[in-house]
Amino acid sequence: FIRLFVRRRETYKRISPGSLVSTMLSRPFALRSLSCFAQRSAVCHRPMNSQVSAGLNHVGERMYSNSNTMMFASREDIKGYLSGKEAVGNDVLGAMEALSNADAVCFDVDSTVINEEGIDVLADSLGKGKEVAELTAAAMTGTTKFEDALAMRLDLLKPSLKDIEDCLEKHPLELTEGVEEFIESLLDKGVDVYLVSGGFRIMIEPVAQAVCVAKTNIYANTILFDDHGKYAGFDANEPTSADMGKPKALTLIKEETGAETMVMIGDGATDAQAKPPANAFIGFGGVAMREAVREKADWFVMDFKDLTEIINKFHKN
């Protein structure tokens, strides 16, 4: 198996895709992972054993919302909360209402869930950081079609399996401050959480595991390797491999789960494209401030604490 790493709360946590518990270094994460199972058991209203019997190599299977018993937040209550507060966006009240009543929340990963761009980290490790960063910026601002930027970056890097493994070992990805608590609050309320990214599944899976999101709730790009672990392209059938891929992914999620109220959170132009089908787009500028995203956001925030407060105050299941 590939040994991957995620940095959380100033501590390196070793995460192996096929194992939740591996070494004493992982013990704090292991305890958090066991609480993931407890959360999913409560959300799904199934005995704990039914979750574990599915296999400890998965952080649960798929999370289903308990929307049939959900008590919806009052628009007037939210309006009263918002009164006198400074908030930025085209429809802040609407975004807060959507988040308060959400049965699914979808996150971008790079510069949102983690505090850097994963492909730029990989490029730096291969000595091609500047060239790739320029292409990443063009994709995030919408000046270059996403599929073109993705193909150009991968053609430039041609990362092998070992390249990626070595990169993540030397430079563990780091969660953005406050995101872990926000996702935990969502899960506690029975909200389905998805990671929808133009990044790479192989780099995102350990991030998902760190925040208790199931592998089945990841929509991302798949890098292909040959029998020797050398780069062999990427799967162009993934919805997130092309421009307008995120709305396609969210449509698939809605069709599969029957989610009625969905929120997209992210820092880039491709995230803003996800509304519709998302009921609201919340722009996040806590890592990278992009004016084009700020202008398109229903609500633009710099800190996940603002979102956590809304969930804890208004969302009821």
Image (tube, grey):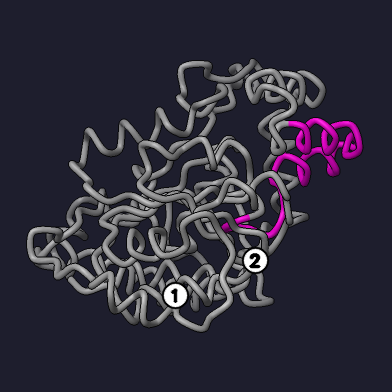
- From the viewer's perspective, tell me whether residue 26 is left or right of residue 10: left
The 10 Å Cα crowd at callout 2, few under 14, some 14 to 19, many 20 or more, is some
Percent from the top left, x then y, of residue 52?
21, 60
Q: Nearer the viewer's eye, disc 1 or disc 2?
A: 1
Q: Main secondary structure of the magenta part?
A: helix
Residue 183: percent from the left, percent from the top?
42, 66
- For the residue labelled by badge 1, is the local secondary structure a helix, a strand or a loop? helix
Residue 161 against residue 125 in the figure, above or below: above
Q: Which residues are magenta?
A: 112-138
Q: Amino acid at mark 1?
A: Thr
What's the residue at 40%, 32% (across, down)?
Answer: 249
Rendered residue at 57%/23% (across/down)? 243
Residue type, numbered disc 2: Arg
Residue 57 lies, with reference to residue 79, above or below; the image says above
Q: Which mark is residue 308?
A: 1
User: On the rendered image, what quadrant is the C terminus found in?
Assistant: bottom left
Q: Which residue is mark 2?
A: 7
| The stretch drawn in magenta includes residue 125 | yes
Q: Residue 313 versus residue 151: which sits nearer the camera?
A: 313
